[in-house]
């Protein structure tokens, strides 16, 4: 899935009491389908916001965001939800698993939500758990897993419905270096095997090395 | 930074601000809901107290106004008193004791023959109850103040102050044999003036008197809300068949003087206040019952405070952790959260008192009507907020809020700082199995306690047993919520997919909070079901009883409604005339009045036992109705009601003493018409023993084949205008009894409705708090593709599940509680045996209401959940 941003700006906190904070300022960006792009920048540079705009979680204050041929910045909430459900996989820094569901249920969540047949869910989840190396942990709950394992479950959940776009926000930020490397290998491997467009935000040079190219953000603008 | 300190608690303002004040202001909905919950609980207690107080105050003030300056009264156990008693008091005159003979009776005014002063058209208003105070108008000035507004003089009305010379001569008009004095406002409201003719039906005699004096609204003229008529004692004695008879003698005894007088049997000298005390005692069980119901609403409110403080702690655990890390002492944390409970308590109580005053007027109407119908004539006016009631409201609301906050506050103070900061902390819930064991202990204790006897006529043990059962079910709440969620998870998943499953697993995941909301709702539901079962059983029992008891064809009464049954009387010759009517087979003359037995007010009744034995089927507890009645006839005995037997520990074969006469008990029958106890004897024996031949109701049995409706019309024509009689069909009596019954329990349902409202507020509160706490999790679901609509469905499913768990628990609890209500509390408070009946429709409606209310309670939090700003929520992690 190709991504295009046209002159996108985004402000936070504009109200009577406080002045708006300009997080993104006139960003234009093109990411080709199947690319593995890395967003880099210091804390507060606007990486997560950019990722949220690409992921149809947020709308820009001005400018246009295109996913494929669809201008997401013009879609209503229902369509945005549908887009996220079908076409995007998210991986977060803090794993963000659903604590009340076990590993199998967490991974199968997007498929269950789409009401896929049970046999298909079982087959696909088994395949994904195999891929992330957690087949033996299927019935465990998130609080029984290590950080690395939780992130692998999160990746499993993000790819189980084979979305054309995978977004990762500091996926190794909360892991030690060994587990971090394992997660990056996994993302690379998924990218290689399924060929989704991957956009990963990170401030680690080591992580950035896994991508095809790096987009650098400074104070809400893209460096040339 | 300047830090203010409370010296006692070493309490620093910044802690209070950070932990309590700011979050309270920020989470407005939750704050408002909690305060409202307490306010509603407190308002119910305050309103009940105010209504009770007003009802009693009206009676007390009337008694005081009528007693005037009398500090003692000579009263008979069974009215009337023989005038000759005055001779026995004569020697006391020399000691400075003053006495005044009094006739003080209730009667009816109007109906047939009220006409206006101008001699205009007849007033067709139905008869209304009135109190007649007849005194020796000259000597009574020692006792009571009479200020005349108008007195008749030579056929004209004059003001006593207008012409002093006329004053003495004008008072003569008041001594004329037909003179009646009315309070001026009372007369004005009814269009009566000097010269108006008024028909009174007093003690079965109808007499038309002329208004010859009007009183200012002072002293006795204010008693019974001004519905009082005054006349000279000789006028009353002559016109109402009371020659030589009195109601009592009022005494004015110099302070410190000991009065010794040889009294006739069945009379006593006592303070006027004794009468109030006896009436209060008679109403005690009724009042305690109302309070117990108000207590339910308050208890539910208490759950709400507990829940709110607990949620505060869970939501602010990070803040608590941070504060502890920087050195805030546990006792300061404890004090801060206790302060939150206190704040809610104080504000909720203040609001509750205001609401209570508004509510009291509505309750007073219902309570007043019940007291009037079932106990004693009292015409309450407005509610009056007294410092005592304010104190009760504040104390109850504040103390209970404080009490509810102790446990969660203590918990917050004990938790280690790092445990509080760590994210994803699971809330600790005591093991459901251990809680279940405690619950069992509560149930066993409740069962044991319920077997204990009443204390002073109040079913204390019953109320404690109710509390123990409630405590038991509250302890079971986590297990019930968990089990229900597990049970319904597959069903929900099948119906709603992963959203259904998520709802089912989310509820037990926050068991600590959800189970408290669930416990509050199941308590409210449980009480609702219990009361529905109790009232339903009672209603069915009474219905069967009325069908069995009211078996005659027609009733002839001097008043249409049952509520005036005691005051409206026929003279005996009406029944004699009735017996001569060709289509009547036989009649049963029924008489009943309140008398003193020991120091308790009971009802003494009489009927014709031979007729009753032949025709009726009195529902008996012991022996057959026929045997008991015929034995009573043969042995000059009595049958007593079950409530009398229980209250005074009497059995068949025992003897009771009334006015120095003894009567053997030959049977015990069921009587739901009053709870003070009834003694019934054959009319012959009654008239012989007490010289009272008046009749309250004549029960008419028609000859076979006579049409009831035609008979009714004929009797109304013959006896209506002549004797002011009403003919009532037995169906009407049955309907009237059931209407009174339903009115009496109206307030019960209203109070429980309030409890349900408070509990539903608890659910809204809990779910809203859970949404705030789960913002991140819910945002995550949204990112993963869950739509706002699906999220709303999930929250409503959660509240529905919670409602379902509470409804199921409430149903079981309701059955347990109804057993205690029927077999312990009712039996001990009122002495009634009630057969168990399940009012299926009522129970189903109660359960459906609770469940639907709980499900709908999820709507507001669901909207909250759907409005989450996903990007902001994700950023906050």
Image (cartoon, rainbow, N blue to C red):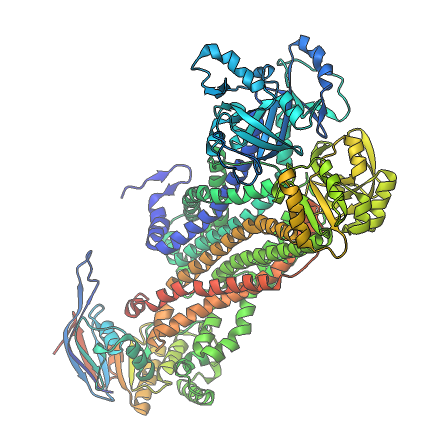
Indicate the position of residue A131 as horizontal and vertical percent values.
40, 87
Indicate the position of residue B274 as horizontal and vertical percent values.
64, 28
Q: Residue at x 47, y 9 (%)?
A: B165
Which residue lies most toward the top here? B94
Compared to residue B215, the image places residue A101 above or below, namely: below
Compared to residue B277, the image places residue A83 above or below, namely: below
Location of the C terminus of chain B by quadrant is: bottom left
The foreground one among B428 and A14 is A14
Which residue lies most toward the bottom here? A193
The foreground one among B166 and B381 is B166
Which residue lies most toward the right here? B634
Q: Is residue A102 left or right of residue B551?
A: left
Q: Is residue B613 left or right of residue B459?
A: right
The foreground one among B56 and B446 is B56
Q: Is residue A206 visible?
A: no
Q: Residue at x 21, y 62 (%)?
A: A13
């Amino acid at each position: 899935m190709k991504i295009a941003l046209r002159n996108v700006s985004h402000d936070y906190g504009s109200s009577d009491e406080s002045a708006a904070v300009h997080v993104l300022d006139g960003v234009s960006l093109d990411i080709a389908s199947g690319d593995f792009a890395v967003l880099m920048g210091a804390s507060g540079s606007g990486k997560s916001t950019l990722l949220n705009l690409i992921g149809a979680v947020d709308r820009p204050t001005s400018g246009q965001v295109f996913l494929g041929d669809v201008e997401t910045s013009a879609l209503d909430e229902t369509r945005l939800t549908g887009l996220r459900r079908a076409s995007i996989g998210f991986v977060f820094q803090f794993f963000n698993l659903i604590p009340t569901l076990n590993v199998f249920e967490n991974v199968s969540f997007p498929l269950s939500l789409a009401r896929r047949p049970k046999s298909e869910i079982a087959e696909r989840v088994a395949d994904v758990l195999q891929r992330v190396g957690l087949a033996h942990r299927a019935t465990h709950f998130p609080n029984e897993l290590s950080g690395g394992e939780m992130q692998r479950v999160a990746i499993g959940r993000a790819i189980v419905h084979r979305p054309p776009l995978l977004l990762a926000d500091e996926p190794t930020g909360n892991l030690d270096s060994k587990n971090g490397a394992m997660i990056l290998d996994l993302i690379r491997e998924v990218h290689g095997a399924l060929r989704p467009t991957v956009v990963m935000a990170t401030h680690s040079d080591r992580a950035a090395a896994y991508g095809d190219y790096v987009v650098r953000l400074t104070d809400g603008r893209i460096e040339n | 930074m300047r830090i203010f300190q409370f010296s006692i608690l070493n309490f620093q303002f910044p802690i209070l601000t950070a932990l309590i004040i700011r979050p309270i202001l920020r989470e407005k909905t939750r704050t408002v809901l909690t305060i409202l919950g307490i306010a509603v609980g407190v308002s119910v207690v305050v309103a009940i107290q105010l209504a009770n107080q007003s009802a009693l105050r009206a009676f007390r003030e009337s008694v005081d106004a009528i007693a005037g300056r009398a500090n003692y009264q000579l009263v008979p156990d069974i009215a009337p008193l023989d005038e000759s008693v005055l001779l026995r008091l004569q020697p006391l005159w020399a000691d400075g004791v003053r006495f005044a003979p009094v006739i003080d009776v209730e009667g009816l005014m109007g109906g047939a023959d009220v006409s206006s002063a101008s001699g205009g058209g007849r007033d067709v208003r139905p008869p209304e109850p009135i109190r007649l105070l007849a005194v020796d108008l000259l000597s009574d000035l020692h006792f009571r103040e009479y200020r005349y507004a108008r007195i008749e003089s030579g056929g004209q009305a004059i003001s006593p102050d207008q012409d002093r010379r006329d004053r003495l001569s004008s008072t003569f008009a008041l001594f004329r044999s037909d003179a009646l004095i009315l309070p001026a406002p009372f007369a004005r409201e009814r269009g009566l003036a000097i010269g108006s003719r008024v028909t009174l039906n007093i003690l079965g005699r109808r007499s038309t008197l002329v208004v010859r004096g009007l009183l200012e609204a002072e002293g006795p003229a204010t008693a019974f809300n001004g519905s009082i008529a005054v006349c000279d004692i000789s006028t009353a004695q002559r016109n109402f068949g009371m020659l030589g008879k009195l109601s009592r003698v009022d005494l004015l005894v110099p302070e410190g003087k000991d009065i010794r007088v040889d009294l006739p049997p069945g009379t006593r000298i006592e303070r006027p206040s004794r009468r109030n005390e006896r009436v209060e005692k008679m109403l005690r069980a009724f009042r305690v019952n109302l309070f117990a119901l108000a207590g339910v609403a308050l208890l539910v409110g208490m759950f709400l405070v507990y829940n709110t403080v607990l949620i505060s702690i869970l939501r602010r655990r990070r803040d608590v952790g941070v504060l502890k890390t920087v050195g805030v002492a546990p006792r300061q944390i404890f004090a801060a959260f206790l302060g939150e409970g206190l704040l809610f308590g104080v504000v909720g109580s203040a609001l509750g008192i205001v609401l209570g005053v508004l509510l009291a007027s509505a309750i007073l109407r219902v309570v007043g009507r019940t007291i009037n119908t079932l106990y004693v004539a009292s015409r309450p006016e407005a509610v009056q907020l007294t410092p005592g009631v304010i104190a009760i409201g504040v104390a109850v609301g504040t103390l209970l809020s404080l009490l509810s906050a102790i446990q969660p506050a203590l918990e917050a103070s004990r938790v280690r700082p790092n445990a509080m900061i760590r994210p994803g902390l699971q809330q600790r819930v005591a093991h459901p199995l251990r809680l279940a064991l405690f619950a069992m202990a509560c149930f066993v204790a409740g069962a044991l306690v319920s077997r204990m006897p009443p204390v002073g006529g109040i079913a204390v043990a019953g109320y404690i047993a109710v509390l123990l059962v409630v405590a038991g079910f509250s302890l079971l709440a986590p297990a019930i919520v968990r089990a229900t969620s597990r049970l319904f998870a597959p069903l929900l998943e099948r119906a709603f997919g992963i959203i259904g499953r998520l709802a089912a697993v989310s509820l037990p995941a926050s068991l600590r909070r959800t189970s408290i909301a669930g416990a509050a709702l199941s308590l409210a539901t449980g009480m609702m079901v219990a009361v529905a079962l109790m009232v339903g059983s009672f209603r069915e029992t009474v219905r069967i009883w009325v069908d069995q008891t009211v078996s005659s064809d027609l009733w002839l009464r001097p008043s249409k409604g049952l509520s005036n049954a005691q005051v409206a009387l026929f003279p005996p010759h009406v029944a004699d005339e009735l017996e001569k009517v060709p289509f009547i087979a036989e009649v049963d003359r029924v008489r009943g009045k309140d008398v003193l037995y020991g120091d308790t007010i009971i009802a003494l009744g009489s009927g014709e036992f031979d007729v009753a034995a032949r025709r009726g089927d009195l529902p008996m507890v012991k022996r057959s109705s026929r045997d008991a009645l015929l034995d009573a006839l043969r042995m000059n005995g009595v049958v007593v009601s079950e409530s009398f037997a229980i209250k005074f520990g009497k059995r068949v074969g025992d003897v009771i003493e009334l006015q120095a006469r003894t009567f053997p008990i030959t049977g015990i029958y069921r009587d739901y018409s009053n709870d003070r106890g009834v003694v019934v004897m054959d009319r012959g024996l009654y008239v012989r023993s007490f010289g009272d031949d008046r009749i309250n109701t004549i029960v008419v049995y028609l000859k076979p084949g006579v049409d009831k409706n035609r008979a009714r019309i004929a009797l109304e024509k013959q006896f209506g205008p002549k004797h002011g009689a009403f003919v009532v069909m037995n169906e009407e009596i049955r309907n009237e009894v059931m209407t009174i019954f339903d009115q009496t329990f109206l307030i019960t349902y209203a109070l429980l409705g309030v409890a349900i409202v408070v509990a539903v507020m608890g659910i809204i509160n809990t779910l809203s708090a859970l949404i705030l706490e789960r913002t991140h999790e819910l945002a995550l679901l949204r990112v993963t593709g869950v739509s706002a609509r699906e999220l709303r469905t999930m929250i409503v499913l959660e509240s529905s599940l919670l409602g379902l768990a509470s409804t199921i628990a409430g149903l079981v609890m309701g059955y347990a509680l109804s057993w205690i209500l029927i077999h312990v509390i009712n039996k001990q408070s009122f002495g009634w045996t009630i057969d168990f009946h399940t009012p299926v429709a009522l129970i189903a409606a109660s359960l459906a209401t609770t469940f639907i209310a709980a499900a709908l309670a999820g709507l507001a939090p669901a909207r909250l959940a759907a409005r989450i700003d996903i990007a902001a929520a994700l950023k906050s992690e």
